[in-house]
Image: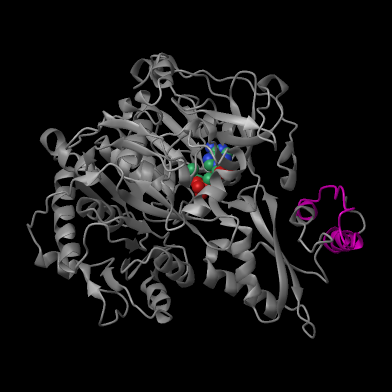
Amino acid sequence: MSTDKRRGTIEAHLVEQQYYKPPDEFIEQANIKDPNIYERFEKFPEGFEEYANLLDWYKTWDQVFDGSKPPFYKWFVGGKINASYNCVDRHLSTRKNQTALLWEGEDGEQKNITYQDLYREINEISAALKSVGIKENDIVTLHLPMVLELPMTMLACSRIGAPHSEVFAGFSATALSDRVRDANSEYIVTIDGYYRRGEFLNHIEKTDAALEGMDERPTVLVWTRHEKPMVDIKEEYILLKDLQKEHKRELVDPVERNAEDILFLMYTSGTTGKPKGCQHRTGGYLAYATGTSKYILDIKPEDTYWCAADIGWITGHSYIVYGPLALGTTSVMYEGTPDYPHKGRIWEIAEKYSVDIFHTSPTAVRMFMKWGEEHLEGYDFSFRLMTSVGEPIQPEAWIWYYEYIGKKEAVIVDTWWQTETGGHMITNLPGISDMKPGSAGLAAPGIKPMIVDGEGKEIDREVGKAGNLIITRPWPGMLQTVYGDDERFISTYWEEFSDTNSSEWEKWSYKAGDGAIQTSDKYFRILGRLDDVMNVAGHRLGTMELESAIVEVKSVAEAAVASRKHPEKGEVPDAYVVLREGNKASDEIRKCINESVEEGIGKFARPANVIFVEDLPKTRSGKIMRRLLENISNDEELGDTTTLSDPTIAEKIRIQVHGEGGK
Ligand code: WT7
């Protein structure tokens, strides 16, 4: 596949794959086996009421959808609801003693939190949060790793109507403070530390550092991984365990939220340096996360369901916390990494809890594949359904996943969606359609994706040519806006393929930023981002964000980041760096660059290669041609270099990277 991102076209040479049928035993028990569902959801917007009806509302909506001010849509208008009530309280009458969250520590420690426990905890935490002054609509930033306190704090926030904004624990102090500032958040909830590969990581130091440059310091609330803190905690911070004890046995009524009130923010990378706060609404989001959990993940209350993602990303919000708990199932959380203390750790947990549904990413599948099937041997587990999410999965990896992990019995759903979409958008309904390795599948019920060329014209399925993936009809899980920046919301997602002067929603289409193909069987195959956003091991990274962190280093004059294909991680960032006069390339500078990225974003974003070059390829108007650097990183043909101000530069870099023998 070669990409020409600037023109939004992709040439794809893909081999068609055979179909795989879901087993009869699966179909018999599937939540959805009636193909009429697609017709039901054809009715717009009423179709989506089916999802909203899975929830308990204090007051039902007066209007399903208000599209009068595109793209600022409203869902379930007039409805009143509380997410925490739906995820916890409403299950007490039927399954209070069932495990809601099943937590496995890195060292094998186990905690089963029943729905009744969760109810108790969340009430006390809600009371504790209120006691420090947190009110309805205050945004609470969470910076928590995979500990039970993370979903519990999220649910306590939603109980009292305070939107949470969880910042993935791997993010650095700078990334944390950027997000706190952008959200004007006056509260941070963090933890002293957690375990990674046997070591206790000091986590609170990131909050300490984040606060340093702030004039108005947020109130900091601290969980502790053990009963007592393991590291120094600043005096002005509040220990949440102690505070919770002061509110023992207190009950806090869930706040009746308007369906359109904010449930949470989730920051994500874009094409500029500044992360975007995707703002999700309460009613529509919860309905969509719950409906897709039931119909696509086939979750039943009696299941043990394990989504091996981090709650710090949207996958964990929708499909570890909100969707599964709203359905009253048992959701597994694992603190550690898949290869610690051994490479069979995942299968050990799957066997221990007899996991029924397993949810992971292509990056993880490729890693398991590289480790080899011998690490699965001897573990007795059998999944009914497995998912793949976050990146395109190559057919070879899909087939390996199917054969060795699914044992040719589990159904696989490849689910395409985004932080912005709230839930699955393109995927098969597991009991209805055949699977096709490498294809995300069909449009989810009620979702209208389309492939268009650069001018917004639909590309005929029969032609099978790739183009821009857009969504032409609104859906309840979609983001409301970019927090505090309606203009950016419009310019990022809508401007390109909408008639922005129109007040008819039918004239507006959402741009996903991905390239895709739809084949004549209506299956979609996702090819990847068309913009300057990379997907590193399932983490979305903007090249601009990386570049800004790199140019922070004093000796660096200019930097451009290109995405290189990687057999396991999908993509990795290569940094092409021009030094200021008088500086020589050195390991010392390379180290500074890596450290600057770690400080600015987080360890997970470190460049795979730092390549010192004399100059960067630029157009005559001075724009860096990242595409050429990408071609070089991937050892592909350079293609057209005539628009460059100095065409020899790209060639020089190519020789520097690959020698005379490269392409
Ligand atoms: C981007 C969104 C969705 C939760 C995790 C990532 C890529 C996502 C797939 C898939 C091919 C996929 C797209 C998308 N992507 N799922 N099944 N097949 N690509 O959320 O960080 O918002 O990233 O991930 O490029 O735009 P995210």
Q: Quadrant of residue 246?
A: bottom left
Give the side of residue 302 with respect to residue 381, left or right: left
> Can residue 101 be seen in this snapshot?
yes
Residue 308 in magenta? no
The spot of residue 8 in percent (x, y) is 70, 42
What residue is at 18 percent from the left and 46 percent from the top?
256
Indicate whether 538 appears above or below 220: above
The spot of residue 401 in percent (x, y) is 54, 34
In front here: 598 or 48?
A: 48
Q: Quadrant of the N terminus?
A: top right
Q: Quadrant of residue 520?
A: top right
The spot of residue 101 in percent (x, y) is 26, 46
- Residue projecting furthest to the bottom: 582
Indicate whether 247 appears above or below 99: below
In front here: 116 or 450?
A: 450
Give the side of residue 102 with respect to residue 537, left or right: left
- Start and end of the magenta stretch? 630-659
In front here: 516 or 433?
A: 516
Indicate whether 85 appears above or below 27: below
